[in-house]
Amino acid sequence: MNYFDLYNFDPFIIIGKNISDEIFANIKNNFTMKNYKDKENNILIYFSSLNDGISFCFKNNILDSIFYYNEKIEKYSKYKGKLPYNLSFEEKNVNIVEYLGDTKKKGGGKYPIFLCYPHLGLEITFLSPNWNDLNNPIIFICIFPKNNNEKYCSVCTNKINNEIFYCNKCKLIFYCSEKCKNIHINFHLKYCDKEFKK
Ligand SMILES: [Zn+2]
Ligand SMILES: [Zn+2]
């Protein structure tokens, strides 16, 4: 592979690759580059395309995160390719919680709300800071290296220590107990049945 299809690629195959890898030649030549230093003195290099609605962030020369934009933020166009986990920009926050469950890693209030699923390497940010807004659209989706040590019950958000209860279809959604699984699994399966069918 000397290039990847910007509209149909598996982000987890390219995350962790070095900026010098030839698969990045196209984005290095055509995308806008910006450099930052974060608080820990890491060098962050962003390659972004407003037209394509996508941005790649390299941390110390290693691809660390990918941002897929809806048309609602800054000057980005809507990303028109295949989103990770078969997500869709049409889904609102209420649909995402039905599909992927609740999580301990979430935020909002002062800022737009977000839902972060570390074991999926996925964070979804919404337009409004209001949790009660059930029609809150996605503004961008971020993909980063998966952390399999951070799995939370999709209902009560307790940390998962024993992986006994999960969705048998996709094996991506976890529960702390039979009780929590029974509360959520049928909501999840509406999406899992649809989205993971090959
Ligand atoms: Zn639970
Ligand atoms: Zn599933």
Image: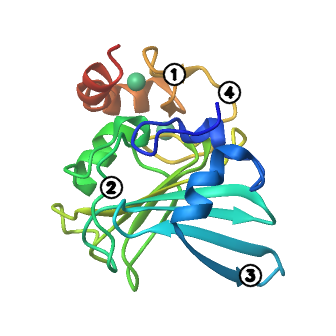
Residue 148 lies in what quarter of the image? Answer: top right
> What residue type is disc 4 on?
Asn
| Amino acid found under the numbered disc labelled 1 | Lys
The circle on residue 162 is 4
Q: Which residue is mark 3?
A: 38
- Tell me which residue sits at (22%, 68%) in the image: 132
- Residue 36, given in percent of the width and then of the height, sits at 69, 83
Distance of label 4 from label 3 (alpha carbons): 36 Å
Relative image position of residue 93 (x, y in whole percent): 27, 56
Q: Residue at x 30, y 26 (%)?
A: 195
- Residue wearing tag 1: 171
Disc 2 designates what residue? 79
Q: Which is more toward the observer, 20 or 15?
A: 20
Q: How many marks?
A: 4
The earlier-in-sequence mark between 1 and 3 is 3
* Figure quarter occupied by ligand 2: top left
- For residue 119, what is the image quadrant? top right
160 or 135: which is nearer to us?
A: 135
Left-right relation of 21 to 70: right
Sequence-first disc among 4 and 3: 3
Q: Give the quarter of the image for residue 69.
A: bottom left
Q: Position of residue 169 (x, y in %)?
A: 42, 15
Q: Residue at x 40, y 86 (%)?
A: 110
Q: SS class of the residue under badge 1?
A: loop
